[in-house]
Amino acid sequence: MVSFTVNGRRVETDADPAMPLLYLLRGELKLNGAKYGCGVGQCGSCAVLVDGRSTFSCLLPLAALAGREVVTLEGLGAGDKPGPVQAAFIAEQAAQCGYCIPGMIVAVEGLLRRDASPDEAAIREALQPHLCRCGTHARILRAALRVTTPRAPAATPEPKR
């Protein structure tokens, strides 16, 4: 029996300890944000946060999760209440097919949990293991910069007299 938390909910499973986390998330827990892309840790579509760090769930056996905290895309926000990273990706229209985007969002979220103000080089490094075959890299980078770059508050217009 392996026990850990997923999106704040305690999970206990007697599934094969060698089974990848991705299979449990999608098959048993019906959390489909993490995608099956390659199954060998080469694309990033399956990324989730484990103890706050972006991790490829297709490579992580359940046995390695005892007592740990997992956060999936679903745990970062929902369609009607997206989290800050999700909102930035929506604002920049970063998704084309959407298959890689959950992993990209998780990667940016994981980066922000380690560094509240990463520079562009750190963002590029965090996103480097993630593949996007649609070619939306510029919009993905803009979305990450939008959420990581502090913005000056909008100026309040002077009242007309």
Image: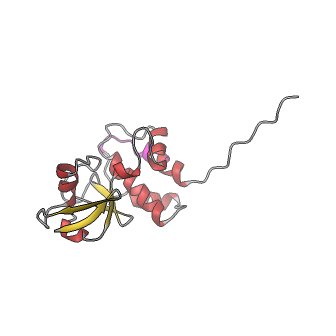
Q: Is residue 35 left or right of residue 85?
A: left
Of 62 and 158, nearer the camera is 62
Is 118 contained in the magenta span?
A: no
Compared to 13, does 85 lie above or below? above
SS majority, magenta: helix
Q: Magenta residues, as a range?
A: 133-142
View extreme (top): residue: 161
Tell me which corner region of the image, top left, top right, bottom left or bottom right, holds residue 69.
bottom left
Q: Is residue 3 left or right of residue 158?
A: left
Q: Residue at x 16, y 68 (%)?
A: 1
Is 137 contained in the magenta span?
A: yes
Compared to 4, does 134 lie above or below? above
Q: Position of residue 35 (x, y in %)?
A: 25, 48
Tell me which corner region of the image, top left, top right, bottom left or bottom right, holds residue 64.
bottom left
Quarter of the image for the C terminus: give it.
top right
Q: Position of residue 71 (x, y in %)?
A: 34, 57
Q: Residue at x 46, y 66 (%)?
A: 114
Q: Is residue 73 left or right of residue 37?
A: right
View extreme (left): residue: 16
Q: Residue at x 24, y 71 (%)?
A: 66
